[in-house]
C-alpha cells in the first residue's frame, strides 16, 4: 500500500515538472514586448467649458399704446428697420359710454358756468364804465370770466379725447398714431388689424404692438451647471458658435454670472450672459441656438504631450514619463505640468523637445480568430 502511494506521488511530481518545463518553453517562444515611443510637440493648449444657450438682443423695446382702442392700420412688418419717430400703427378709439356721458355732462356744466360768468362780467364792465364800481371789482369779474372760459375749453378737450382719442393743442400726449421711440429692427408685431389693445398705465402693462431692438448689439444668454460655475468668472473670453451659421465663430466677453441657481431636471443651472464682439457684417437672427466655449486657461505655442503618456507615482502622485535611453531601455523623468485640455497637456519642465517617450499603455494587437 505504501509503495503504491509513493508511486502516485512521484507520478504527480513528474507531471508537474514536465508541465513547468513546457510552460517555460512556450514563454520563451513568445516575442518580447516592444514599446512604441512618441515625441513632444509644440501646441496651443486651451482649457474650456461649454455652455448652451441662444443669441438675443442686448435690449428689446416694447412699443405700447397710451390709449385703448382697436388697431385700425399697421405700417410696419417684422424684419424692417425703422427710425425713432416712424409711424408704427393707428388706433381707432372705441369710447366708454359711461366716461363719454360724464365728459359730456362736464361740458354742459362748464357752459352754464361760463354763461353766468359772462353775464356777470358784462354787468360789472358797464358799471365800471360809469364809474360806479372800483377797478379791483372789475378785474375780479374779468378773472372769473376767463377762468370759466378755460374750464369750458378743457371740458371740451376732455370730451374730444374720450370720444376720438386726440384733440388739438396737446401735441402727441394723447394720440391715436403710435410711433417708434428708438432706432432699430422690428423683431415682432404680435397684433393685427382689428385687434383690441389696452393702454399702458400704472395698473396695466398694456398691449405690445411691436418689439424693437438694435440687432448690431447682441448677447449670448445661456446656462452652466453648478459643477462648472466655480471655474468661471466675469471677464473671461467666450467663443460663440451658432448652429445655423456653419464654419464661423464669434468672440464675446462673459459679462454676467447669476448669483442664484435654478433647478432644472434635477440639476442646478446658473444663467450667464456675454456681449458679442462682431468683427464683420454677418447677420445673426435673434433667438438662434448657440454654444459658448468659455476659455478658462490658454497656453500658446508650448511643449505638449498626450495625457495618455503621463504616469503617476502611486505614493506621491508625482507625474512622470519614461524616456528612452537606449534600445527598449527607458528612464523615469518627473514632470511639471501646466494647462490641459483633456487630450494634450503642457509640459513646463522635465523633458526635452526631442525626447522619445514610452507609450506604456499601448494596446496589444488582436489575435486572429480561427474557426474549427
Image: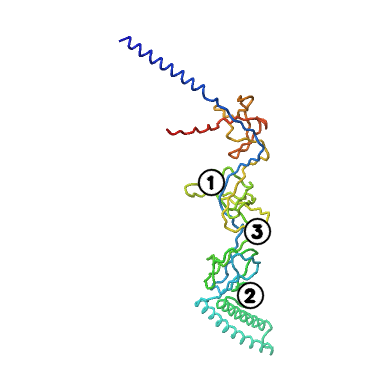
66 versus 118 height, above or below: above
Check whether the beta carbons of the residues at disc 3 and disc 2 lie within 8 A of each other. Answer: no
Q: Earlier in the sequence, mark 3 or mark 2?
A: 2
Is the C terminus in the top left, top right, bottom left or bottom right quadrant?
top left
Reading the image, the residue beneath label 2 is 170
Query: Marks 2/1: CA distance?
Result: 55 Å
Residue ranking furthest to the left: 1
Instruction: Please identify, in this view, whether the residue under mark 1 or under mark 3 is nearer the observer.
Output: 3
Reading the image, the residue beneath label 3 is 216
Query: Marks 3/2: CA distance?
Result: 36 Å
- Residue 356: image quadrant is top right
Query: Where is residue 35 drawn, in percent x and y?
Result: 58, 29
Q: Residues within 10 Å of mark 1 (few under 14, many from 20)?
A: some
Q: How is the image coloured?
A: rainbow
Using the image as rendered, state which of residue 268 and residue 108 is in the foreground: 268
Q: Circle 2 sits in a helix, a strand or a loop, which is it?
A: loop
Reading the image, the residue beneath label 1 is 225
6 versus 312 height, above or below: above
Query: Where is residue 216 drawn, in percent x and y?
Result: 65, 58
The residue at the point 63 percent across, 78 percent down is 168
Amino acid at each position: 500500500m505504501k509503495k503504491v502511494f509513493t508511486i502516485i506521488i512521484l507520478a504527480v511530481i513528474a507531471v508537474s515538472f514536465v508541465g513547468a518545463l513546457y510552460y517555460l518553453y512556450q514563454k520563451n517562444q513568445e516575442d518580447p514586448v516592444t514599446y512604441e515611443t512618441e515625441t513632444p510637440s509644440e501646441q496651443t493648449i486651451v482649457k474650456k467649458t461649454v455652455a448652451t444657450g441662444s443669441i438675443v438682443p442686448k435690449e428689446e423695446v416694447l412699443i405700447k399704446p397710451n390709449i385703448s382702442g382697436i388697431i385700425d392700420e399697421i405700417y410696419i412688418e417684422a424684419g424692417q428697420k425703422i427710425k425713432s419717430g416712424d409711424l408704427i400703427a393707428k388706433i381707432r378709439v372705441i369710447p366708454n359710454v359711461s366716461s363719454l356721458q360724464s365728459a359730456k355732462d362736464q361740458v354742459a356744466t362748464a357752459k352754464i358756468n361760463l354763461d353766468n360768468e359772462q353775464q356777470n362780467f358784462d354787468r360789472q364792465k358797464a358799471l365800471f364804465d360809469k364809474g360806479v364800481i372800483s377797478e379791483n371789482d372789475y378785474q375780479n369779474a374779468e378773472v372769473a370770466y376767463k377762468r370759466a372760459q378755460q374750464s369750458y375749453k378743457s371740458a371740451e378737450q376732455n370730451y374730444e379725447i374720450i370720444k376720438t382719442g386726440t384733440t388739438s393743442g396737446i401735441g402727441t400726449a394723447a394720440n391715436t398714431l403710435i410711433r417708434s421711440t428708438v432706432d432699430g429692427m422690428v423683431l415682432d408685431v404680435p397684433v393685427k388689424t382689428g385687434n383690441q389693445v389696452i393702454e399702458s398705465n400704472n395698473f396695466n402693462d398694456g398691449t405690445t404692438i411691436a418689439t424693437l431692438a438694435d440687432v448690431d448689439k447682441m448677447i449670448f444668454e445661456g446656462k452652466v451647471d453648478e459643477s462648472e460655475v466655480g471655474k468661471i468668472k466675469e471677464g473671461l473670453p467666450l467663443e460663440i458658435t451658432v448652429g445655423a451659421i456653419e464654419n464661423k465663430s464669434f468672440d464675446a466677453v462673459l459679462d454676467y454670472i447669476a448669483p442664484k441657481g435654478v433647478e432644472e431636471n434635477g440639476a442646478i443651472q446658473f444663467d450667464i450672459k456675454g456681449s458679442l464682439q462682431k468683427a464683420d457684417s454677418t447677420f445673426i437672427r435673434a433667438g438662434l441656438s448657440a454654444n459658448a466655449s468659455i476659455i478658462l486657461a490658454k497656453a500658446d505655442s508650448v511643449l505638449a504631450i498626450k495625457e495618455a503618456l503621463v504616469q503617476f507615482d502611486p505614493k506621491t502622485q508625482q507625474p512622470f514619463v519614461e524616456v528612452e535611453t537606449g534600445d527598449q531601455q527607458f528612464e523615469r523623468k518627473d514632470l511639471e505640468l501646466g494647462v490641459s485640455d483633456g487630450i494634450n497637456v503642457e509640459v513646463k519642465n522635465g523633458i526635452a523637445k526631442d525626447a522619445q517617450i514610452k507609450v506604456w499603455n499601448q494596446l496589444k494587437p488582436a489575435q486572429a480568430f480561427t474557426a474549427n
